[in-house]
Amino acid sequence: MKQNEKRKNNLDERQELQLLEVEHRGCWLAFWGLLIALMVQQIMGAEAAQMAGEWIVFMILAGYLVIACAKRGIWDRRLKPDIKTNLLFSAGVSILFGAVMFATIFHMNPEYVMGSIAAGVYTAGFLFVLQFVSLSILAKIVTKRQKELDAEPMDAEADAEDQNR
């Protein structure tokens, strides 16, 4: 059997698009499912060793998505890489994880309500700053890459014109 026969694509264009859609939805289902599973385990007081497998897979998936999109100059379908977007997402993520930290501490020690609130607020504040700085840096990288990719076809056309002269 030839090598090409092993790699032959048996799908037509419609099936190829449908497969890409299935893979796309499966990827995001895995991403959000792992995140929810990790948050539930955290709230229930699971030890780090119990969450290690999910955490490793989640971080590899998240890292891949960030790097692959940044390399291609992709930020989002609807949102722009600007300060408003960074502020909104940083606030949302920090509030969510501040609430998870509050619930975790409160679940383990219901008598320490103020301590649980303080832990949630501290976590939210720290994550807000960390997330905002990270998103701002990533937004600059993606914007720079978009400009590089937009400039490439023009440079290739200009080079071809110069060679023809």
Image (tube, helix red, strand yellow):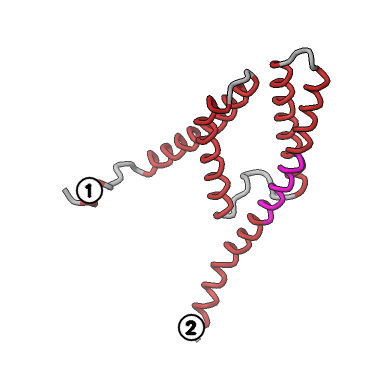
Which residue is labeled 2 in the image?
Answer: 163
Q: Position of residue 132 (x, y in %)?
A: 74, 45
Q: Main secondary structure of the magenta part?
A: helix
Task: Give the mark, 2 or 1, whose residue is nearer the N terminus.
Answer: 1
Q: Where is residue 101, by image quadrant? A: top right
Which residue is labeled 1 in the image?
Answer: 5
Report crowding for label 2: few under 14, some 14 to 19, many 20 or more residues within 10 A (C-alpha). few
Q: Position of residue 90 (x, y in %)?
A: 73, 39
Q: Where is residue 98, by image quadrant? A: top right
Residue drawn at point x = 52 percent, y = 82 percent: 162
Above or below, comparing residue 20 to residue 118 in the picture: below
Residue drawn at point x = 69 percent, y = 21 percent: 104
Determine which of the numbered discs, if any, sits on residue 41 in the image.
Answer: none
Residue drawn at point x = 73 percent, y = 48 percent: 133
Q: Secondary structure at mark 1?
A: helix
The residues bearing labels 2 and 1 have C-alpha atoms spaced at a distance of 41 Å
Left or right: residue 21 compared with residue 140 = left
The residue type indicated by label 2 comes to: Gln
Write down the region rendered in magenta: 128-140
Q: Position of residue 74 (x, y in %)?
A: 59, 51
Report crowding for label 1: few under 14, some 14 to 19, many 20 or more residues within 10 A (C-alpha). few
Q: Residue lying furthest left in this view?
A: 1
The residue type indicated by label 1 comes to: Glu
